[in-house]
Image (spheres, rainbow, N blue to C red):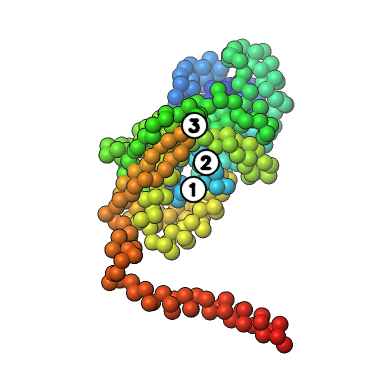
Amino acid sequence: MSKETRKIVLAYSGGLDTSVILRWLKETYECPVVAYAADLGQGEELHGLKEKAIETGADEVFVEDLREEFVRDFVFPALRANAIYESTYLMGTSLARPLIARGQVETAGKVEADAVSHGATGKGNDQVRFELAYMALEPGLKIIAPWRIWEFKGREDLIEYARSRDIPVPVTKEKPYSSDRNLLHISFEGGILEDIWSEPPEEMFVLSVSPEKAPDKPAYIEIGFKEGNPVSVNGEAMGPADLLALLNELGGQNGIGRVDMVENRYVGMKSRGVYETPGGTILRVAHMAMESITLDREVMHIRDGLVPRYSEMIYNGDWFSPEREMLQRLINETQKNVNGVVRLKLYKGNCIVVGRKSDTSLYHPDFATFEEDVVYNQKDAEGFIRLNGLRLKIAQLLRQGRKGS
């Protein structure tokens, strides 16, 4: 193997799995291993990461701050589409993986590596997302997926290997579930959550208080939009990453954004996922409210019909596919007039639209009024209804005729 592979770039998080993978790659392939980590808003999880990677055996370490790029170029495009998987999941992990993979590929080019590796298991969605991105961006790279080829069966095997190699293993009590964090969400799965009848423990949640413990007084906020993108909170212009971080804080304080679902994984099995997405939940509600007054009816309905397919593309790892890019261009075209401000009330887990205004609004009270107006003649409705009901009338007349014959 050592002759086949010159250098490997590993997607590294510093956890047990990728720490073991780092050392295993060096021993198995006998070549330099570069640890690559993308800062997407993990916070304290990145503290001491470089030092730990070096101690574990990394020849080089790259920690790249991609928070702004993540929100601007991945979260916001999905937001412009109101993307949601199976009507529930805002896809925080799905949107993060292609960006991490792209960072790995770019790093591989810089350090002249000929292989990339990841810590995703052979059962989940992430292996697909990473590897489809690698193939789309640099098909010449060798892909190494340790969980599909090594002899280890589970966590205990990893711990034993780590201790035998003096790889630091956290001495804190193991969490009875796994989690993944970025600026859009925190996800929880596995362990105790595999019992789908049991309620998630309250101490598990990180970004949000429970709705029961949220303030008794509602919080009002205003979100400004320009061409479908959120650009301000309460009148203050903000960059994408700072804006989402603020809404995570405000939403979390009011118990907003918790989701408990059983989803259909791309690889074919059902899996329970529990998510905290306070800022993303607020933005989706606000964006849909902004569209309600600025988007043409037929344009909206055509776009809405494409949302499930678009969301599946992201969930299944097709971010860099031509079909996702084609749909994105169409979606972006719909957003040119999605400008204005939405006012929301945050209260005990609820995000309620209480106001919206826009200079490009298609709503006008003079047209919608029940009073007499000059653009709508109520008598016109009679012909409209008769034509729309003609097919129903004909069908019933034919049925009656057949019964009478």
The one of 389 and 265 positioned closer to us in this rendering: 389
Q: Residue farthest to the front?
A: 371
For mark 1, what is the residue?
83
Above-or-below relation of 362 to 150: below
Q: Which mark is residue 347?
A: none
Of the numbered discs 2 and 1, the one sitting upstream in the chain is 1
Of the numbered discs 1 and 3, the one sitting upstream in the chain is 1
Q: Quadrant of the N terminus?
A: top right
For mark 3, what is the residue?
211
Mark 2 vs mark 3: give the one in front. 3
User: What amino acid type is highlighted by mark number 2?
Assistant: Met
For mark 2, what is the residue?
91
User: At 53% across and 79% down in the image, what residue appears?
Assistant: 390
Q: CA distance from mark 2 to mark 1?
A: 8 Å
In percent of width and height, residue 191 lies at 66, 27
Q: CA distance from mark 2 to mark 3?
A: 22 Å
In percent of width and height, residue 38 lies at 46, 30
In percent of width and height, residue 17 lies at 61, 24
Q: CA distance from mark 1 to mark 3?
A: 25 Å
